[in-house]
Structures are given as C-alpha cells and as structure tokens.
Image (spheres, rainbow, N blue to C red):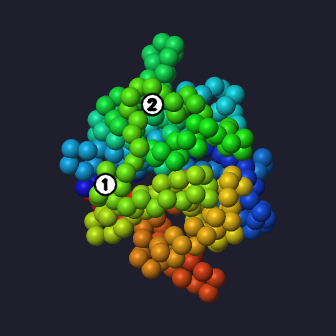
C-alpha cells in the first residue's frame, strides 16, 4: 500500500464560525484571521494505492460553482485536484474508488464536473465507485435548513444518476476501519488505515485543525455540538493511547499530527509533513 497526500487548493472561512463559542482572543493564537475575520483552510485529500485499487478519500470543492459562490470561500492556491493526481503519476480515469467522509460541498464537490461544453454534469472519475453510507445519504438528500447550503444537489445526485454510487458496508473495506461520528453531520465516516506499521486516521471534520484539539473548540457548523464533544474526547483519547497519526484535511499548516496527554487533556505532540514522515 502507498498513500499520497492530494492537495486541491485552499479556501477561507470565518474564524468565529469555525470555532463556535470560543473567543477570538483564544483561537487566533493558532489560527490567525485576516482583516475580514477569515482564516485559511486546506482542502487536502488522500489517495491510497493498494493492489489494483486506487482510492481517493474526499475530493475537495471542485471548480463548477459560480463566481458568486467562490467569492464567499476565496478558493486560492496553486494546487488543484487533477494537477495533484498528475504530479503523483495518476489520471482521474485511474481512480477505482472515491470514499466520501460526508457530502458537504468542500468534501465532495470535486467528484462532479461540467462537461466540455458546460451544458451538463459528468463524473470526474468515470471508472470509480463513489462510496457514501445510507444514513448519511438520506441526511444529505433530505437536508435540514441548517445544512442545506452545504449539501449541493449538483455535487450529490449525479453520483446516483450515473450509477456509480454504493453504500459502505464494513466488509467492503477490510483493510481499514471506519469510525462513525454524528456531531458535525449525521454518519460522517473517519477512516483509520494501517500503514507502514502505523495507524493513520483521515480526520475530515471531526478535527478540522490542530487548533481544534481542546474539547470545547467545536465548530459553529456542527449540528450537535455536545455530541461532537463526546466523540472528540473518545477519539482523541484513543489517538493518544494508540499513538495514531492524524491526517489533517483542513489544517493549512499541519499535514499530519500526533497527540500527547497533558494535565489539560490531549494536546499537540508533533507535526509532520507527510512526505517527510513517509519517504517513498
């Protein structure tokens, strides 16, 4: 098995929304904001090559939305999905599986794109199975008013319309574990992968950044913040105990981190660049 980080660009979100009830005087120490109170966030996906399978975990925001849409999120940087695949020697047609932690636009928007004439949508990965789960699919396709702006039908429904959607059963992936978290959104999937003698977890929105490690640092976007507190505690305690390596999807500064116990609970231990940690 070989794992590749796949950066697909950076974007910006309001710091207050990202840290909920935590005062700016505290969160800006780790995640400084610009003059508009916007903080920088990564869109970092993971590619797993295992035998004849090539699985992409999440796929970024995509490029098919309107200029007005992108004006809210300031998509920027030199990286994009197809370029990052090419740098590692792959083409979108090589992808066999697209595993979606959840269906918010910044995690699944890259899976569907405009056709050449911009008259209809088509799958970015025409040979891939797109994996969600039945509980989350229903949550995303019958969205509540709080999350409706994050579940964009043009990102989601074409997966099913093109006949490429499947729902995850644990036996489908006996080479990694799935931790289900329900505080951010219903049935978010956190993959935990055995890799080179270590365990690596793709953190998605259970832990958006190293700045979110303290338990009360919960996003204002989370639908059930008290449940997020419980799930974070369970997972971060496990991360310390089992010495997990945490692959950070949204942290602009930290690609992979480890944790340690302190008198204040789990805290950052080490931060690594992926390619420095796992030399190929």
Residue 43: give x, y in percent of width and height. 52, 46
Look at 52% across and 34% down and name the residue there: 156
Residue 171 is labelled as: 1
Q: Which tag, 1 or 2, sits closer to the chain's start?
A: 2
Crowd class of label 1 (few under 14; some 14 to 19; many from 20; radius 10 Å): few
Q: Quadrant of the N terminus?
A: bottom left
Residue 266: give x, y in percent of width and height. 56, 77
**Number of numbered discs visible in the structure rendering:** 2
Residue 255: give x, y in percent of width and height. 48, 59
Distance between mark 1 and mark 2 Cα atoms: 21 Å
* Towards the viewer: 190 or 165: 165
Residue 4: give x, y in percent of width and height. 35, 51
Q: Residue 277: which quarter of the image? A: bottom left
Look at 64% across and 68% down and name the residue there: 229
Look at 21% across and 44% down and name the residue there: 52
Residue 82 is labelled as: none
Q: Quadrant of the C terminus?
A: bottom left
Q: Which residue is mark 2?
A: 160
Report the residue that reaches farthest toward the bottom.
Answer: 263
Q: Is residue 247 visible?
A: no
Look at 52% across and 42% down and name the residue there: 137
Element on which disc 1 rests: helix
């Amino acid at each position: 098995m070989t794992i590749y980080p796949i950066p697909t660009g950076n974007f910006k979100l309001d710091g207050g929304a990202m840290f909920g009830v935590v005062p700016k005087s505290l969160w800006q120490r780790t995640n400084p904001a610009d003059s508009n109170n916007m903080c920088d966030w990564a869109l970092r996906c993971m590619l797993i090559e295992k035998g004849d399978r090539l699985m992409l975990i999440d796929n970024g925001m995509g490029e098919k939305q309107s200029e007005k849409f992108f004006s809210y999120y300031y998509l920027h940087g030199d990286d994009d999905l197809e370029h990052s695949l090419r740098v590692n020697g792959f083409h979108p047609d090589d992808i066999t599986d697209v595993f979606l932690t959840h269906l918010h636009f910044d995690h699944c928007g890259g899976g569907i794109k405009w056709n050449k004439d911009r008259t209809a949508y088509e799958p970015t990965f025409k040979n891939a199975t797109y994996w969600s789960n039945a509980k989350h699919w229903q949550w995303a396709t019958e969205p509540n008013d709080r999350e409706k702006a994050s579940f964009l039908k043009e990102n989601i429904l074409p997966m099913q319309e093109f006949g490429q959607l499947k729902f995850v059963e644990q036996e489908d992936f006996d080479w990694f574990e799935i931790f289900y978290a329900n505080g951010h959104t219903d049935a978010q999937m956190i993959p935990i992968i055995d890799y080179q003698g270590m365990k690596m977890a793709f953190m998605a929105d259970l832990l958006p950044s190293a700045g979110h490690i303290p338990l009360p640092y919960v996003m204002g976007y989370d639908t059930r913040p008290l449940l997020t507190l419980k799930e974070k505690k369970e997972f971060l305690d496990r991360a310390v105990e089992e010495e997990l390596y945490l692959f950070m999807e949204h942290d602009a500064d930290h690609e992979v981190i480890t944790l340690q116990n302190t008198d204040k609970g789990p805290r950052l231990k080490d931060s690594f660049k992926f390619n420095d940690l796992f030399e190929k």
